Amino acid sequence: MAIHNTSYQHWDGVHLGIWRRRGVVAGSSLTACLRNKWMVNLIVVCWSTALAAAGILFLVGQLLVADSIVVQWVSNFNPELQQFVKLLTTWLEQHPQISVRTTQNVAFYFYAMFLLRFSIFALGMAMPLLITRDLASNAIVVYSAKAINRGDYVLGKFCAAFGLLTMTWLGPVCAAWLVGNLLAPDWGFFWHSRAALGHLLLFGFIALTSLSVLALGISACSVKEKSTVAIWMMWWVLGGVVTPIATHTQPWLRHVSFNYNLQQIALSIFGPGTDLKVAQDTIPLLSTMMSNVHPETMEALNAPTIWGAVVAMILMLGGAAYVIWQRVKPE
Amino acid sequence: MASPLIIETAGLTKVFGPQRALDGVSLSVGPGAIGLLGPNGAGKSTFMKCLLQLQPITSGSAKLLGREVGREGREIRRRVGYAPEQDCHIPGMVGCEFVTLCAQLSGLPFQAARQRAHEMLDFVGMGQERYRKCETYSTGMKQRLKLAQAIVHDPQVVFLDEPTNGLDPKGQAQILELVASLWHTFGITVVLSSHLLHDVESICEQIIIIARGQVLVHDSLANLKARKRGAAEVVVADRHLELQAACQRRNWACELLSNGHLKVDHQAESLNPLLQLLHELKMAPLEIIPSPNALEESFIQALNLSHGNS
C-alpha cells in the first residue's frame, strides 16, 4: 500500500509569509554549503581557534588568582617574562576597567583579523552554491516562477553568505569573548570588556555585510563554477601581494584589496594603536619588548587610511550590486 | 454566472531589440484546458513569461487571475505553477528535496511541503528515482519532475511549456494524460504551450494559435473543428471533364490540381451534396479528401507565416 495518496489532493493550509520564503532560499543554500565536508572541517577549525582564544583569556584571568596553577607556572619563566607578567597582574588588579578593556580590545582585533582569512576561504568554497550554479542550471527560472521576486532571492542568498560567515567568524569570536569572560575570576570582566564586544559586533556587521555582497557579485559574474572561485581567490591573493608593493609606490593601489580595506576599517573601529600606547605607558617593559616592532607597523596601527578604505569599499559594493542586478534574471 | 477570466491582456507587446516577440496581443481567456499553439519562435513562451513576470512587458497590460501583472507578482505566482521548457533543476539536489523546496518557496510549511512533494511525485509516476540526484535523471523523469514542482503548491493555473519535448510516444501519452486530468478531474486551469497540434488537440478545449507574436485564432476546439470550408479533393480514375462540367452546372468552383485531383468547392459543411452528385453521375471515386478544419488550416497558416518570416 502506498504511503502517500497517489491521486491529486488540493491543499488548503495557511501559506507562510515572505520572510519565511526568503529564509527557505537562505536555508537551502546554507544546507548545500554544509554538505561539503571540507566546509564542515573549516568551521570546526574556526571554532577550535575560538576555544584557544577563550583559553588564553582564561589564562590571563588566572593571573589574578594568587594560588592558581598559572601563577605557579609563570614562576618557571625567565626573569624578564616574570617581571612582565607581574606588571601585567598589577595593572589588572589596580585598573581592571582599563586593563581588561585594553587587553581584550587588542586581543580581539588580532583574533578577528586572523579569523577573517578563514572566512574568505570559506566564501571561496561556497562561491558556486551562492548564485553561479543557479544561473548555470537555470534554477533561477524556477526561483523566479515561485512566490518570491528577484530581490527576495538575492536577499535569501545574502543571508546564506552572512550565515556562513557567522559560522566561521562572528560566531567563534563572540563565543571566545563569552567563554573567556565566563571563565574569568570576576564577573566585572564582562562589563570591562564591553567595548571589545561592541567593536567586534560593529566590525563584524560591516565586514560580513561587505564580504557577503562582494561574494554574491563575484558568484553572479559567471556561470562557470571554477571561474567564480578563481576570481574570488585571485582577488584576495593578488590584493595581499599588491598591498605591500603599493605602500612604497602608489599607496592608493592598496585599496584594490578588499582585505586591506577591511583591515583599515577594523583599525579605525578597534583602535589597537591607542590601546597599545596605554599599555606601554603602564607597563614600561612592554615598550622594551615592542622596540623590535617595525616603525611602519606601529604607524599603520595608529593611522589607518579609513576614508580611502570606505570609498573603495563603497565602490566595490556598488560594482557588486550592479553585477547582481544585471545577472540575476530568469533569462 | 460567467466564469471569471484567467488571462486578460490588452495590446501586450514585448520587444527584443529589433524583434517584436509579442505584437499587441489582446486576449480574454476563461478557465479550462487552454492550448497555446504555434511554430517554434512564434512567441508562445514569451507570452507565458510575460504573464509570469519572468520577462518585463514592453507595452500593454496583462492580468492573471484578475490581478495586475507587474504589481502583484508574488501573489500571482503563489497561485500559479510553471514548468519551463528547459531543464531547471538544482544540481546536487535529489528529486524529492527539489520539489519540497519548490513547495516551500510557494509558502508551504516544511512538513506540508514534504508531504505534498511525495504525493505529487507519486501522482506524476516517479518511484524510487525521487531519491536520486536530479542531474542523473532521464529526459522523461526531468519532465515529470518539472510537472511535479509546478503543481506541488496546488496552483489555480499551471503553465506548461512544451511538456512532451524529448519524450517517446508512450511517455508523451502518459504526460498528456496527467495534464488532461489536472483540468478535467481536479479543476486546475492548464495552459499548455506546444508546437505539436496533436498534443494540444488531444487535451485542450480552448485553442490560441500564435504566429510572429500575434494571435491568429482564439476559439474553442469544438468550434474550430466544426468550422470547415466546403471543399474537398476528389480522386477519380477518369471522367475528369464530366465531373468538372457537372460541378459548373451547380455553380461549384472546380479546379484540376497538378497531382490529378479535382478540387471541388461544394460550399456545404458536409460532403453529402458532393456524394449525391457522384451518385447521380454513377462515378466511383478512388478517394475523397475533405478540406482541413479551421484548426488545421490556422495551424498551417501559422507555420507558413513562420516560414515566411524566416
Image (spheres, grey):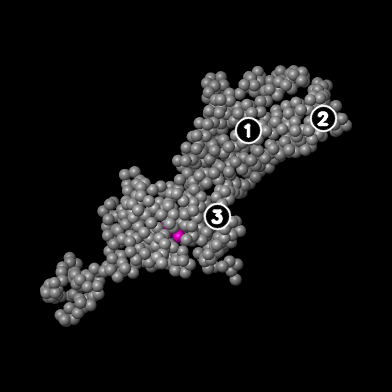
Output the chain of dot 1. A
The crowd level at tag 1 (other Cα within 10 Å; few <14, some 14-19, many 20+) is many
Which residue ends up furthest to the right in the rendered image?
A: A67
Residue B87 in percent (x, y) is at 46, 54
Residue A45 in percent (x, y) is at 68, 40
Disc marking residue B58: none
Q: Do the numbered discs 1 and 3 sit on residues whose CB atoms are within 8 Å?
A: no
Q: Residue at x 61, y 43 (%)?
A: A163
Helix, strand or loop status at disc 3: loop
The crowd level at tag 3 (other Cα within 10 Å; few <14, some 14-19, many 20+) is many
Disc marking residue A203: 1
In this picture, which residue range is highlighted in magenta? Answer: B157-161
Helix, strand or loop status at disc 2: loop
Is disc 1 in the same subunit as disc 2? yes
Q: Earlier in the sequence, mark 1 or mark 2?
A: 2
Determine if residue A107 is in view.
no
Query: Amino acid type of disc 2?
Result: Leu
Question: Could you tell whether B193 is left or right of A284 in the image?
Answer: left
Nearer to us in this view, B76 or A246: B76
Task: From this view, report whether residue A230 is shown above or below residue A79.
Answer: below
Could you give the CA–CA distance between mark 1 and mark 3, rounded to whole angstroms?
35 Å
Q: Which residue is mark 3?
A: B107
Q: Residue at x 28, y 68 (%)?
A: B227
Q: Residue at x 68, y 22 (%)?
A: A274
Query: Amino acid type of disc 1?
Result: Phe
Nearer to us in this view, A53 or B166: A53
Q: Do the numbered discs 3 and 2 sit on residues whose CB atoms are within 8 Å?
A: no
